[in-house]
Every structure is written in C-alpha cells, then in structure tokens.
Image (spheres, rainbow, N blue to C red):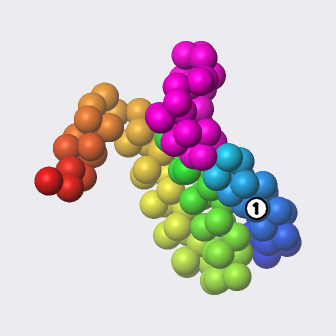
Amino acid sequence: MFKGLEKVFDIIGEILAVIMVIVFALLIINANFSFLPDTVLKVFSYVQNYGSLVLMAVVGLEAMSKRNFIFQIIFLALLALIVIFLFFPGTYENLIGLIPSGN
C-alpha cells in the first residue's frame, strides 16, 4: 500500500525530526532564560505535543511501507485510535495523571 512512498516518508520524517529537536531545544532554553514571547511559546507547545505524534506517524508509515498489508492495517488502526481519542475531553489530564512524577 505504501511501497512507493517509503522515500517520501523518509524525507518528511527527517525534516520533522530536525524541527522537533529545534523546538525542544528552544523550549528547554526558554525554561531557564524566558526569552520567547507568549504567542511563540504557545505555538511551540502545540508543535511539541502534536509534532511528536506526527513524527511518530510518519516514521511508522515509513516502517510499515516495508511490511505486509496486515501490519499496515494494524498500524493505521492504532494511529486512528490515537487521533480519535485526542478529541475526547480530559484525555491529556488522565494521561498526565498516569505518568510517574519521579518522586
């Protein structure tokens, strides 16, 4: 299903990975020096949350392009499940409650 798109997913994944590293670096630096305006910080926060999901999807699609049709369908179903549940109210609050705080 995705055999011809393997190279496209590879290039998009590489570009997204570089963008995500830059965004994460700027957010970490901003946590210490607070130089980003609030609007830019808000945009970067959205990029941090949803960009990670997009990067996982693109890299997963690249990996699934080498697999058989059944694995591709399973991956697409799991990806759809994640995207659908993102629209449910309270998803992030419940998810963050499951992550150990390190104490």
The local crowd at label 1, few if under 14, some if 14 to 19, many if 20 or more residues have their Cα within 10 Å, is some
Judging depth in this view, the residue of 89 and 31 nearest the camera is 31
User: Residue at image x 61%, y 39%?
Assistant: 26
Q: Which corner quadrant of the image does residue 29 belong to?
A: top right
Judging depth in this view, the residue of 51 and 8 nearest the camera is 51
| Horizontal side, residue 67 vs residue 84: left or right | right
Q: Residue furthest front?
A: 33
Q: Which corner quadrant of the image does residue 17 belong to?
A: bottom right
User: Residue at image x 14%, y 53%?
Assistant: 103
* Element at label 1: helix
Per the picture, the main secondary structure of the magenta-coloured stretch is: helix
Q: Is residue 30 magenta?
A: yes
Where residue 38 appears, as percent x and y from the top left, is 55, 16
Judging depth in this view, the residue of 67 and 43 nearest the camera is 43
Q: Quadrant of the N terminus?
A: bottom right
User: Residue at image x 49%, y 70%?
Assistant: 74
Q: Where 71 falls versus 88 (above or below)?
A: below
Q: Where 100 falls versus 44 (above or below)?
A: below
Q: Which residue is mark 1?
A: 14
Quick check: can you spot residue 5? no
Quick check: can you spot residue 34? yes
User: Residue at image x 64%, y 83%?
Assistant: 67
Q: Where 7 falls versus 46 (above or below)?
A: below
Range of residues picked out in magenta:
23-47
Where residue 42 appears, as percent x and y from the top left, is 54, 23
Where residue 50 appears, as percent x and y from the top left, is 54, 41
Q: Amino acid at mark 1?
A: Glu
Number of numbered discs on residues: 1
Where residue 61 appears, as percent x and y from the top left, is 66, 66
Q: Is residue 93 magenta?
A: no
Q: Which corner quadrant of the image does residue 100 belong to?
A: bottom left
